[in-house]
Amino acid sequence: GNNKESSMAMNLFSHVGKDLAESWCDVNAQAIRENSDSSRENKNDNENENKPNGVFSDLQSALYPSLASYCDTQITCMNSSNREGIENVLMLHVLNHILTANQDIKSHSNRIRSLEKGEEDFDTEQFRDQGYTRAKVLVLLPTRSTAHQFAKAMIDMMGEDCEIEEEERFEMEFGPPIIAADDDDDEENNNDDADDNAIQRRKAVQKEKGKDWLELFGDDVNPDDDFKIGIAFQNTKNKRKLKFYSNYYHSDIIIASPLGLKVATTNEDDEEDVGDVDFLSSVEIVLAHQADVMIMQNWDHMASVMSCLNQQPKKGTGIDFARVRNYLLSGQAAKWRQTIFVSRFSDPHIIAAFNRHTQSIAGRVKIRRKVPSDEASICDVMIKMRQIFQRISCDSIATQGDSRLKYFKDKILPELLSSKQKHTLIYIPSYFDFVALRNLLMKNDRAQYHFVSVTEYARVSEVSRGRARFLQGRKRIMLYTGRAHFFMRHHIKGAKHLINYGLPEHAEFYPGLLNMLTQNVGGDSEDALLESESPVTCLNLFTKYEAQCLERIVGSKHSERMLKNENKKVFLFNS
């Protein structure tokens, strides 16, 4: 299949404009050299097989044909090593679409002007090359820092001779935060050492949170998730120009967060009423990049944005209807729109949104990667322990929350209370499940005094107080939400027993949580000494609707067996 994919990709690449093709090859050379997206088997092959055409890597050769054919595409195999290669091929497709469309409009306009000078009538149907509005591409990204990274890559791909307008303002609003330098007064110098120590401690703590967290929320990036910006491309005889902060109606590409676009398209007086969405009426490509991060923000905003696309405009000012494409006039724009979702992993929210909002006549393509057993995240657990996976029976996805809560109430909670087990961390991926579980514990006469909660909405003082009481054993149970872990990456000290109320969406969270567990929870009391003698434990609850999460944790082969075996509901893994 590799040679066939390669030849298809090269055939489609031959239609890319010369200037863009040259600059793209220069930028993509690094991804080609590393070729990190090849499978391990391919890495053992010779270099020529690994790089069949010298332009695309193996993964890029697989992706580009579906992108260039305008299929709705779901890519859920992105990771830190192949991310650059995926982003490069996405950028190539987006820029080629915009530059080609602009060139067609320009050449058709020149042709119309020359025909109008003549006396003969001519058919305008051949010149239908536009939408109601200019915006052709919508790129949805989670934070300003990811938008900054995307735009800078776009500038690099446009080549050195491209003139950039408003770049300084863009750097100020989207680039790394600027830290003001302190004056060198004598009084301030006395505090320099203390400040330096505090900065070093903060950097050390942040470094422990991981590279992916630093890229999204570190001190060197802008984590704001409310933004939108229009970008326009202009081609003159001698020079290409890229302009930031162009009006939405005069932009070729709009880069925004789901929240930013939701705010921009909602009336201030009535949140239920949709505001001005005419500038999204002619979008031809929607790229939702890093959708796995947007799931952790508010996925409802994504649904709102997708429902606003390709509606018939309410205002007709400035539209040359003789140039508008026929499928737009007949209200068929959604069927000609390409939707691209890119994520680190497959998730029910992403799958549902993709299935609901994609109607392209070119078809759908879903690209995923199976997880070999030796690459599953469970292999990264460094503590010697038994990990029990308990499958919970449920009839539908709508009732899985109730089924899980009932199992916890009937089987797990009585045992926790009767054994008086301390240092039990309960990780809950869904906030709705957290609320249900918290209410269950609050209503229980014995449990209501023995638990603390750490959520994404809690104040810093509440979190610190709860963590301290949990560490000291004054509170036996801690409820810890998935979003709190995603945004804060707390290292919970004093945890000895872990219950995953649901499987973590991010595969790396599973070994991260287990590696936090400690045998010796500290203290000299008799209870503490008895506690230190008991082994660390881990219980994972899952349903058949968490197949994607389970696959990332235990591998494709094990997950298939665990889900299909109706007679067996308990599975044991040893690390």
Image (cartoon, rainbow, N blue to C red):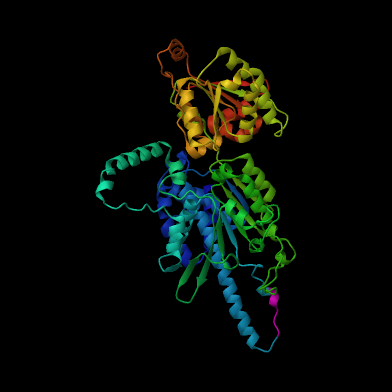
- The magenta stretch spans which residues? 121-125
Q: Residue furthest bottom?
A: 119
Residue 559 x %, y %: 59, 29
Position of residue 218 measured from the top left corner of the image (x, y, whole percent): 43, 44
Would residue 122 be counted in the magenta stretch?
yes
Residue at point 68%, 30% (across, down)? 400
Task: Note whether residue 4 is visible.
Answer: no
Q: Using the image as rendered, state which of residue 543 and residue 476 is in the foreground.
A: 476
Dominant secondary structure of the magenta stretch? loop
How many circles with numbers are drawn on the protein? 0
Quarter of the image for residue 209 reads top left
Relative to the observer, which residue lies in front, 206 or 281? 206
The answer to whether residue 129 is visible is yes
State the residue lying farthest toward the left: 186
Q: In this view, does 288 lie above or below 539?
A: below
In the displayed orientation, state which residue is furthest to the right.
330
Residue found 49% across the figure and 53% down from its top: 144
Horizontal arrangement in the rendering, residue 208 relative to residue 504 (left or right):
left
Return the x and y of residue 99 as percentages of the image width and height: 54, 67
Q: State the image coordinates of residue 392 (x, y, percent, origin top left).
A: 66, 25
